[in-house]
Structure formats: structure tokens, C-alpha cells
Image (cartoon, helix red, strand yellow):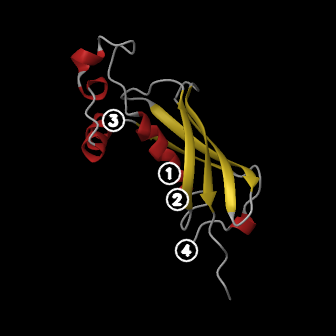
Amino acid sequence: MLGKTYDQMAVGDSATFSKTITETDITLFGAISGDFNPAHMDAEYAATTKFEKRIAHGMIATSLISGLLGMKLPGAGTIYLDQYVKFTAPVYIGDTITAKVEVVEKLARNRVKMITTVSNQNGVSVLEGEANILAPRAPKL
């Protein structure tokens, strides 16, 4: 079943998804991405950085946006065209982050502009951005 079609979407529609970031998430993301930066993987090294402890890969937060677009809004059948991302604060192991997507403009040819944000359990923004997607079309009868 397809998600919301272009015609069903309206400016202001939004969806959220929350996840607590675990040690396993960081290990698996490192294995998938090949990013074993010691800021993510090595507690002794991370203690010497401005963050003072290990941080999650920024792209973990971005991947929650991908999940929202593909599974909630618009949902199945969505094609992710592009994403602008600005990382605004670190994500640590144990943080619960909430991603949000919101429709801000319906463009030509089933394209939709979305504002994308991720915040932590304290309401601190960890990511701000914008995505363009190709929304599912209504099935032809």
C-alpha cells in the first residue's frame, strides 16, 4: 500500500519518529558506513575532544528522516530526491532523538519540499535541514 499521494498532502502536514541511540546503533552504523572515526568508536580519544565523550554519527540522525519519508509521510512509494543538512549539536549514546518532517511547499510534477529537524530529549536541535521528495501518485484506474 502506498503512502499519502501528492494530491492527499497539504502544506503543514507533519510526522515524527523517535529513537534512543545505543552502543549497538553506533557499532552497526560504523560497520555499514565504514566510518570508524574515533570520535564515534573510542571513548579515550573522544574524552580529548570538545564533546568529552563519544558522539553518534551525524548521519544516524539523518537516516531517521529517511525512515520518516519512506514509512510515514508521505510513506511507501516516496522517492527521496535531495537533502540539505546542518548539524547543530552532538548526539550521544543514550540520547533519545526525535526526527520531524513537515510539508512546506508543493511543487510541480509531484515534488514536495519538506523542512526536516531532529531534536534530543531536552528539546535541543541537533539537525536542521530541508528535503525534496517525489510523492507517490494516485494509482490509475
Q: Which residue is mark 2?
A: 70
The amino acid beneath tag 1 is Ser
Helix, strand or loop at mark 1: helix
Distance in Å between CA atoms under marks 4 and 2 = 12 Å
Helix, strand or loop at mark 2: helix
Q: Which mark is residue 22?
A: 3
Distance in Å between CA atoms under marks 1 and 4 = 18 Å
Helix, strand or loop at mark 3: loop
Horizontal relation, residue 75 to residue 28: left or right: right
> In the rendered image, which quarter contains the N terminus?
bottom right
The amino acid beneath tag 4 is Met
Foreground tag (3 vs 1): 1
Q: Residues within 10 Å of mark 2 (few under 14, many from 20)?
A: many
Q: Which residue is mark 1?
A: 66
Residue farthest along the bottom direction in this orientation = 141
Distance in Å between CA atoms under marks 4 and 3 = 31 Å
Residue at position x 46%, y 38% from top? 61
Q: Which residue is mark 4?
A: 1
